[in-house]
């Protein structure tokens, strides 16, 4: 049995390690590495507070992992009632285990982590889809909506990114970017990175697609100004190299909706470099 604790709003309640425990009818002193309560017929030491190291407990942890990544996962994904919609946003935070000094928690963690590699539990933008870690395209912090002011997911389509990587690829939900432990795990499991090269490779195609959408180009120029400024703060040389490549891209929209390359008008994209301060 697995039990979740919910707020009155329907959000997942973050249980502290002191309150999320393994149960065998009564609570043990073994913390669960994910924010829920787990009850099963675990083999306990005589004091009934800690696990024995035995094959049965290993097998039970494997069953817990199977249950989490199948029945529980599908139930969370299919939550359609208004009060349960928030559970979808909690999915990656529920399944990715924290570190723990407890042997029982470590046992479950070691069983759960490998299973997540091929499990579609990572939510995409707006939680429209759940995909495997290898199908996510991570946004670097320097290009995040918080830093740049424009969401990459609002500018570039999943299709464009997938065509570049020759495999299905999606932007993750924004909440994921705020959790370094989740990002680290996704990288280890093959998540793609949205680099300068990816950006430049798909820019021409996206500009052609949106050539009749003035607002899209306003977002693009806003993004370029801020992103290049952030890049210049780290390395003026890198920023200048990026702009040199950008000059060849047809991204200037004329009044008759034709696209042209900047042709050396660097100041449009890189005003901070005109001032050494």
Image: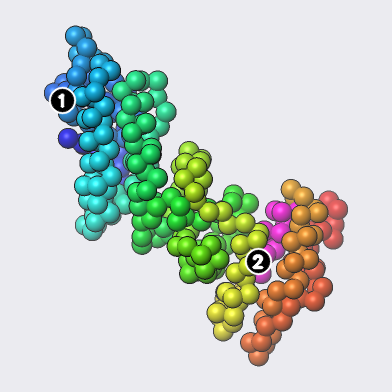
> What residue lies at 62% left-to-right and 64% top-to-bottom?
199
* Magenta highlight range: 219-232
- Measured as percent of width and height from the top left, residue 209 is found at 55, 79
Residue 118 versus residue 42: which sits nearer the camera? Answer: 118
- Measured as percent of width and height from the top left, residue 77 is found at 28, 54
- Measured as percent of width and height from the top left, residue 59 is found at 23, 30
Q: In the figure, 105 relative to 137: above or below?
A: above
The answer to whether residue 134 of the structure is visible from this angle is yes
**Secondary structure type for disc 1:** loop
- Does 65 sit left or right of 43 as displayed? right
Density class for disc 1 (Cα within 10 Å; few <14, some 14-19, many ≥20) is few
Q: How is the image coloured?
A: rainbow
Q: Most prominent secondary structure in the magenta stretch?
A: helix
Dot label at residue 41 = 1
Lower position in the chain sequence, tag 1 or tag 2:
1
> What residue lies at 15% left-to-right and 25% top-to-bottom?
41
> What residue would you read off at disc 2?
200
Q: Residue furthest front?
A: 55
- Does 106 sit left or right of 57 as displayed? right
Density class for disc 2 (Cα within 10 Å; few <14, some 14-19, many ≥20) is some
């Amino acid at each position: 049995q697995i039990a979740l604790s919910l707020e009155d709003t329907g959000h997942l309640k973050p249980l502290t390690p002191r309150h999320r425990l393994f149960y065998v009818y009564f609570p043990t002193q073994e913390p669960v590495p994910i924010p829920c309560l787990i009850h099963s017929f675990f083999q306990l030491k005589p004091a009934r507070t800690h696990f024995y190291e035995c094959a049965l407990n290993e097998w039970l942890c494997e069953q817990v992992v199977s249950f989490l990544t199948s029945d529980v996962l599908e139930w969370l994904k299919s939550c359609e009632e208004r009060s349960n919609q928030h559970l979808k946003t909690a999915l990656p935070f529920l399944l990715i285990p924290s570190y723990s000094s407890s042997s029982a928690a470590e046992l479950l963690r070691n069983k759960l982590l490998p299973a997540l590699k091929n499990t579609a539990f990572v939510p995409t933008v707006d939680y429209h889809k759940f995909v495997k870690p290898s199908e996510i395209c991570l946004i670097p912090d320097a290009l995040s909506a918080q830093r740049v002011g424009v969401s990459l997911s609002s500018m570039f389509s999943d299709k464009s990114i997938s065509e570049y990587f020759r495999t299905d690829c999606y932007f993750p939900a924004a909440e994921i970017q705020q959790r370094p432990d989740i990002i680290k795990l996704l990288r280890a499991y093959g998540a793609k990175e949205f680099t300068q090269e990816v950006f430049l490779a798909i820019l021409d195609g996206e500009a052609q697609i949106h050539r009749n959408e003035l607002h899209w180009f306003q977002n693009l120029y806003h993004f370029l100004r801020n992103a290049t400024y952030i890049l210049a703060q780290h390395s003026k040389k890198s920023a200048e190299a990026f702009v040199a490549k950008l000059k060849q891209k047809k991204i200037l929209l004329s009044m008759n909706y034709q696209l042209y390359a900047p042709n050396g008008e660097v100041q449009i994209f890189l005003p901070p470099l005109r001032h050494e301060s």
